[in-house]
Amino acid sequence: MKATLLFIAMALVSTSVFADAKEDFIAAVVKSCGKSKEDAEKMATPGRSGNIIKWQTCSSSSVDIDGCSVQCASSSKIGN
């Protein structure tokens, strides 16, 4: 029973973390590139090689995603 509850709690937390990252990515695309929210949502691809991860792991001040230079959050830089 405890293992099941733990699994459910972990699934809920991981889903909410991704949702927050996705919303942050969408906001960054809208702000940096002047795209509409709908276009930014289309650019918010998940997965290990998706655009959200590329943006979260920026090693510079911006990252080029689909021809758009998206400004990275200062806390997301891993190379500094």
Image (spheres, grey):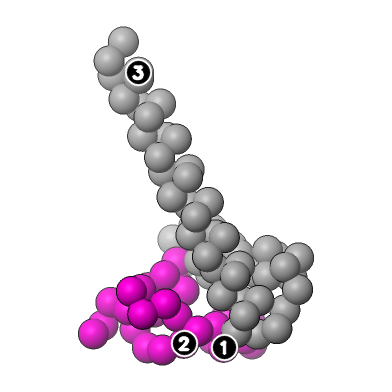
Q: Is residue 61 magenta?
A: yes
Residue shown at 65%/85% (left/top)? 33
User: What residue is at 48 percent from the left and 43 percent from the top?
Assistant: 15
- Disc 1 residue type (three-letter): Ser
Q: Secondary structure at mark 3?
A: helix
Q: Mark 1 and 2 residues: CB-CB less than 8 Å, in contact? A: yes
Which residue is tagged 3?
4
Quadrant into which the N terminus falls: top left
Asked if the residue under mark 3 is in contact with the one under mark 2, i.e. CB atoms within 8 Å, the reply is no
Residue 35's place in the image compared with 38, above or below, is: below
Residue ID at (26%, 83%): 79
Q: Give whichever of discs 1 and 2 has the lower sequence position.
A: 2
Q: Where is mark 1, residue-wise?
A: 69
- Of residue 24 and residue 45, the one placed in the foreground of this image is 24
**Residue 56 visible within the image:** yes
Q: Quadrant of residue 22?
A: bottom right
The span shown in magenta is 53-80
Residue bearing the label numbered 2: 62
Could you say where residue 52 lies in the image, as x and y percent from the top left?
50, 66
Q: Give x and y (percent) for residue 44.
A: 60, 64
Q: Is residue 18 left or right of residue 10?
A: right
Calculate the distance from the C-alpha at mark 2 to the C-alpha at mark 3. Answer: 41 Å
Instruction: Specify the amino acid type for callout 2.
Output: Ser
- Sequence-first disc among 3 and 1: 3
